Image: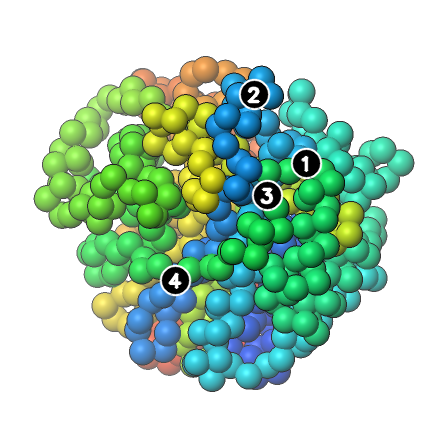
Amino acid sequence: MPETPIFSSAAVAAPHSLAAQAGLTVLAQGGNAIEAMVAMAASIAVVYPHMNGLGGDGFWLVRERGGRVRGIEACGPAGREATIARYREKGYDAIPPRGPEAMVTVAGAVGGWSLALELSKALGGRLPLETLLADATRQAREGVPVSASEARYTPQPGDTLHEAPNFAATFLKDGKPYPAGETRRLPALAGTLEQLSHAGLDDFYRGDIGREIGVDLEKLGAPVSRADLKAYRAAERAPLTLRRRDATLYNFPPPTQGLAALIILGLYDRLNIAEPETAAHYHGMIEATKRAFAIRDRVVTDFSRLRHDPATFLDAQRLAAEAARIEMKRAASIPIVSHSGDTVWMGVIDKDGLAVSYIQSVYWEYGSGTVLPRTGLAWLNRGVSFSLDPASVNPLEPGRRPFHTLIPALACFDDGRVMAYGSMGGDGQPQFQAQIFARYADYGMSVAEAVDAPRLLYGRTWGAPSLSVKVEDRFDPACLSALERMGHEIEPVGQAYSDTLGHAGMLVRHSRDGRIAATHDPRSDGGALGL
């Protein structure tokens, strides 16, 4: 049964209960949604380190009370030493996923917190940074129980995660992962958070923390330097928009795959599928995903190096023509490039209607696996999405932003409802967004039912060249048989609720009374809280 949603005047949703509580504490102290999200972003970095961290990236969508939606891009570029020649000379055919050579890009998340707080102050936010980071600092210093999600993670065969510098000393106990529920402390990270609380977030890039990071990066031989940190600043980006039925949808522009998320919903809308949880419903979602990913993989790259205007792919006539190519009786065989990765999505809507949809990640579980000893930062490996082929859509190049799977989402309905929603899950993110949005907006499910309902994921399986549709155990067997007859390869994941199918969340504020319905995924360790 779906979890009971929160109904309140201000609400938070996060994949870990301690992060949700950190946000609620800020709201209770009079903080706004942006301030609450910074507190949650810091806390989730401590309590869910396999999914995200201060050494990662983030993306924000913020809807102001007056209706304006703003985006904050907090993803770092490749370092000045990150060149194709460097890796070719070292004998690599691709960027390695673990260790110092995987530390290709600057960590942008903290820069995003800083830019978001500038916006917060312009909107009336007044809480000091020390208050916002207090819970995270305490959690890192005193320790928190290791989550069930983290304890479930097992590296794939051949993964060198545990061999990455300082990983074992930080995240293992006697050479083995901590069991769920056992307390783990992160003292070096606590010191970093405390320093940022007093010195300000800019210290991460251009102050004492930045200097400490730079020393460790140099000792490790990573292609990112202190000069790269000093040069970095988060940027504001106008979101992509899609007009669909009775709502305007917002998602993040390149270098993220937000374009794919909007295309899926734009195509699915045009298929006019009347009944949910049917073979037609699932088939429509899968086929829309294939076509959206085909466009994504030839279009999405660094924002400043785009060859195509992403908005043109959201044109009504273009979407109609693409939807007309979908055959409702047969699966298309469109190859896609697979993008893995895990992350956290979180949402906040405050009592004044300020809404935040936020996503933060180190890409693969624990990112590069490398932990900087002076600061306790686990550094991201987002740069593995670069190609060492200079003719590719996303070639490695100093100063270039990598392709990102991270996509926060917002929707504004004609009746005044405002929705913040999203999910973790690499290639699954746009698919999960489409599935939970359509269930709520098109088929009348509650927020809790939409997030709880069984999900599917179209993509490659581990170690297998073929494509498959991964499904949770709660799907109707008759529908799955019908999908197989259409030509879909169905792969049961063997669980009723699976991490593979994402940790999603949704908050919806109703304009008539300001009430917020909020929920977070039963697949995660979190939930929704409200005032």
Q: Which residue is mark 3?
A: 224
Closer to the camera in the image, 161 or 47: 161
Q: Residue furthest top?
A: 465
Task: Give the secondary structure at mark 4.
Answer: strand
Q: Which residue is mark 4?
A: 236
Kindly identify the residue that appears in the image at 48 percent across and 67 percent down: 115
Find residue 379 and report its horizontal and vertical position in percent. 64, 44
Residue type, mark 2 in image: Glu
Task: Give the secondary structure at mark 2.
Answer: helix
Q: Which residue is mark 2?
A: 89
Kindly identify the residue that appears in the image at 66 percent across and 57 percent down: 210
Q: Earlier in the sequence, mark 2 or mark 3?
A: 2
Kindly identify the residue that appears in the image at 78 percent across and 47 percent down: 373
Closer to the camera in the image, 511 or 399: 399
Tell me the CA gap for discs 4 and 1: 31 Å
Q: Which residue is mark 1?
A: 221
Foreground label between 4 and 2: 2
Foreground label between 4 and 3: 3
Dividing the picture into quarters, in which one does residue 430 lie? top left
Quadrant that contains the C terminus = bottom right
Find residue 158 and report its horizontal and vertical position in percent. 67, 20
Residue type, mark 4 in image: Glu
Foreground label between 4 and 1: 1
Label 1 Cα crowd, 10 Å radius (few <14 / some 14-19 / many 20+): few
Kindly identify the residue that appears in the image at 42 percent across and 60 percent down: 235
Closer to the camera in the image, 98 or 417: 98
Tell me the CA gap for discs 2 and 3: 18 Å
